[in-house]
Amino acid sequence: MATHRPALPLLPPILLAGCAFSGGPVGSLPPPAKPSEAGTLIIYRDQSPVGIFGTLRVTLDGKPLYRLGMGQSHRVRLDSGEYLLGYSIGLNDCGGVVNIRSGQTERVRLAPNCMMHRD
């Protein structure tokens, strides 16, 4: 007769792995004042295994915006101008300026080591 070991020891790693892929909005921004002249900011998280058990917490001009899990992205329409894009994961607090131009799309890939790659 075979004995079965309970799957309980597998539960914590499965739950922690889920944290790396769960993201979503944590705040909202007002709509652009002039939608016809707005630009688009697309942010996406690098697929790096660094920080695999956490989400990137993203802010725009200091306001909470989104949590990004591994491989996730978020798109937001903004008025033209400069914005401070910040994000954190674990002990790393990162940030930089993004310039949004009317009718254009700015793509930024965020890495857990504080590198912001413009694509």
Image (cartoon, grey):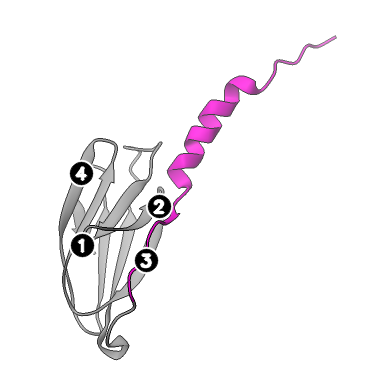
Discs 1, 3 touching: Cβ within 8 Å: no
Give the label on residue 51, or none.
none
> Mark 3 or mark 1, which is nearer the start of the sequence?
3
**What amino acid does circle 1 point to?**
Asp
**What amino acid does circle 2 point to?**
Gly
> Mark 2 or mark 1, which is nearer the start of the sequence?
1
The CA span between labels 1 and 2 is: 23 Å
> Mark 2 or mark 4, which is nearer the start of the sequence?
2
Give the label on residue 28, or none.
3
In the image, residue 80 sits, relative to residue 96, either above or below, namely: below
Q: Left of 119 or right of it: where is 1?
A: right
Number of the front mark, 4 or 2: 4
> Mark 2 or mark 3, which is nearer the start of the sequence?
3
Give the label on residue 71, or none.
2
Discs 4, 1 touching: Cβ within 8 Å: no
Quarter of the figure that contains the N terminus: top right
Kindly identify which residue carries mark 1.
61
Which quadrant of the view contains residue 97? bottom left
**What amino acid does circle 4 point to?**
Asp
Kindly identify which residue carries mark 4.
93
Discs 4, 2 touching: Cβ within 8 Å: no
